[in-house]
Amino acid sequence: MRGGSNTWHDNFAYEEAQRQARLWSRRFDDLLQTLRNSVIVDLPNDYQRVEIGHVVIIENQDNKEKRTVRIGSYFCFVKNENDITISYAAPLGQLLMGAKVGEIRSGKLNKGPAIFKIVEIKKYE
C-alpha cells in the first residue's frame, strides 16, 4: 500500500509538537526583540504629573468611588489585594498619563465613558 495525500497527518503528536515549537520560538524571538528595544526609565522624583512608576489615587466622578493604581511599564499588569499596577499603554493608563492633581480626565474605557478626578499622586512604597 502506498501513502497518498491523506497520510501526512498520521502522527498528530509529532506535528503538534512541531507546531508548539514554532509557536514558542516565535514568542521567544518577540521577547528578545522587546528586551533589545527596552529602555530603563528612572522613576521620577516630581509628583506634579502622572508618570510611569507613580501611584495615583483617582475618584470616579459618577459614583465618587476612590481607587488607587500604579502606572507601570508596557507589559505590566498586576492585580492583587495590595497592588493594582496597570500599563501606561492600557486605556486607563493612557487616560491618566500627564494629569495633575485636581485635574479631571474623561475617556472611554471597556465599560463605556468614564470621568476621573486625580486626587493624589505619590511614590510607590
Image (cartoon, rainbow, N blue to C red):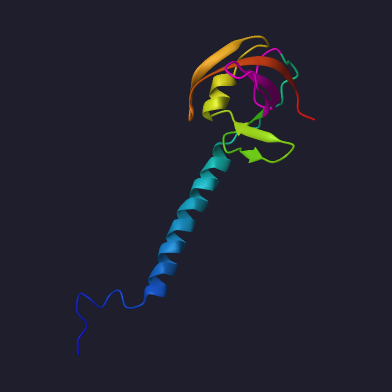
Question: Which residue in the rendered view is the most extreme toward the front?
Answer: 63
Give the magenta range: 48-69
Quarter holding the C terminus is top right
24 relative to 53 in the view: left or right:
left
**Where's residue 15, x and y in %?**
38, 70
Depth check: give the residue in front, 90 or 62.
62
Depth check: give the residue in front, 101 or 64.
64
User: Image quarter for residue 65?
Assistant: top right
Residue drawn at 45 percent across, 53 percent down = 26
User: Image quarter for residue 98?
Assistant: top right
Task: Establish if 73 lies above or below 54.
Answer: below
Residue drawn at 67 percent across, 34 percent down = 84
Depth check: give the residue in front, 74 or 119.
119
Residue drawn at 49 percent across, 50 percent down = 29
**Where's residue 50, x and y in %?**
65, 18
Residue drawn at 52 percent across, 15 percent down = 106
95 relative to 58 in the view: left or right:
left
Depth check: give the residue in front, 61 or 91.
61
**Where's residue 2, x and y in %?**
19, 86
Quarter holding the N terminus is bottom left
Question: Which residue in the rendered view is the most extreme toward the right?
Answer: 125
